[in-house]
């Protein structure tokens, strides 16, 4: 549930943002499979507008894991921001930076491979269609990515990721390959967690010179056994701005999380968003109070 504050006082209502239904199975000690259906709201036409619910097959994959190698094939969950999402831990309140600002999909058709060299260093490679699980790509465009994850001590983790998304010229238009770079670092112990990431995407949407870049910081502090205080701050900027900008340029979230049972999380929180106008001379601000609930069986 959300309710607008101040000038946004007329914006309020109940939402059901997403529901998953899935099945996992084991074929052998090294081979497993997964199928997952995702019922989620469609991408918004404008920020904070209501949309119809759409149902997708998000995962239909096989996973082979043995001797430090992990290979996934099919309609798979991707590695681009999976570590950040797991560290962040509040996906039911808001997506992580790359997911929220559409720098890359969370799942796609293709193959990923990971190798754990030693306990503190791992590398991964992905070769996918690039368009995500909402679209079935039948052309010859692919997205290739490489990642490196370092865990030098138990509580500290670093990740470097980069990819190139190929595109072909259309009717003589000036088309450029899209490139993405992501840096992440996080520290988590029993007293607090703190993570930060920087993301850069050049020639976004295959438009030459259309670069976007920004950073996100998030963390939490356990105050007692079932309560946490959490917070997050995002800032993103663009070299070019499309006329129908959908997402905020700046966002702040802070609140409490209460977990009465292992399967239930309840989070009253406050959100501030700022969305720039197209001409970059004005901006709109919004203040909202939220109550988010997660049920995970």
Image (cartoon, rainbow, N blue to C red):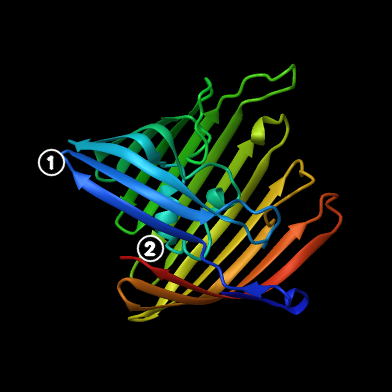
Residue visible at 47% across and 39% down in the picture: 161
> Residue 33 occupies which quadrant of the picture?
top left
User: Mark 1 against mark 2, which lies toward the viewer?
Assistant: 1
Pick out the residue farthest to the bottom. 224
Measured from the top left, where is residue 48 in percent x and y? 67, 63
Viewer-side residue, 277 vs 229: 277
Residue named by callout 2: 188
Q: Identify the mark nearer the N-term, 1 or 2.
A: 1
Judged from the image, the secondary structure of the residue bearing numbered disc 2 is strand
Q: How crowded is mark 2: few (under 14 residues within 10 Å), some or many (20 or more)?
A: some
Residue named by callout 1: 29
Viewer-side residue, 220 vs 104: 104
Q: Is residue 176 above or below residue 135?
A: above
Q: Residues within 10 Å of mark 1 (few under 14, many from 20)?
A: few
Quadrant assignment for the N terminus: bottom right
Residue visible at 66% across and 69% down in the picture: 272
Residue visible at 63% across and 50% down in the picture: 214
Measured from the top left, where is residue 190 in percent x and y? 33, 71
Pick out the residue farthest to the top. 172
Q: In this view, does 117 lie to the left or right of 129?
A: left
- CA–CA distance between discs 1 and 2? 31 Å
Measured from the top left, where is residue 193 in percent x and y? 42, 66
Q: In this view, does 279 lie to the left or right of 100?
A: right
């Amino acid at each position: 549930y959300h309710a607008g504050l101040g000038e946004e006082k007329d914006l309020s209502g109940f939402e059901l943002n997403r529901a998953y239904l899935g099945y996992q199975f084991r074929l052998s000690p090294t081979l497993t499979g997964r199928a997952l259906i995702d019922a989620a709201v469609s991408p918004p036409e404008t920020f904070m507008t209501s949309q119809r619910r759409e149902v997708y097959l998000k995962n239909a994959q096989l996973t082979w894991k043995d001797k430090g190698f992990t290979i996934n094939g099919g309609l798979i969950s991707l590695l681009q921001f999976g570590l950040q999402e797991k560290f962040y831990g509040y996906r039911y309140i808001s997506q992580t930076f790359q997911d929220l600002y559409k720098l890359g999909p969370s799942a796609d058709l293709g193959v990923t491979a990971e190798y754990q060299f030693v306990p503190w260093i791992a590398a991964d490679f992905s070769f996918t269609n690039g368009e995500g699980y909402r679209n079935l790509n039948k052309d010859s465009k692919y997205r290739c990515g490489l990642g490196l994850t370092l865990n030098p001590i138990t509580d500290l983790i670093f990740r470097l990721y980069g990819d190139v998304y190929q595109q072909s010229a259309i009717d003589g238009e000036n088309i450029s390959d899209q490139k993405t770079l992501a840096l992440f670092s996080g520290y988590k112990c029993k007293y607090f967690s703190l993570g930060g990431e920087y993301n850069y995407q050049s020639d976004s949407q295959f438009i030459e010179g259309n670069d976007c870049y920004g950073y996100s910081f998030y963390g939490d502090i356990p105050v007692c056994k079932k309560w946490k205080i959490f917070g997050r701050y995002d800032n993103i900027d663009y070299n070019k701005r499309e006329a129908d900008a959908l997402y905020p340029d700046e966002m702040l979230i802070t609140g409490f999380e209460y977990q009465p049972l292992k399967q239930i999380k309840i989070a009253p929180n406050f959100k501030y968003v700022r969305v720039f106008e197209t001409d970059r001379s004005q901006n709109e601000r919004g203040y909202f109070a939220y109550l988010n609930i997660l049920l995970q069986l």
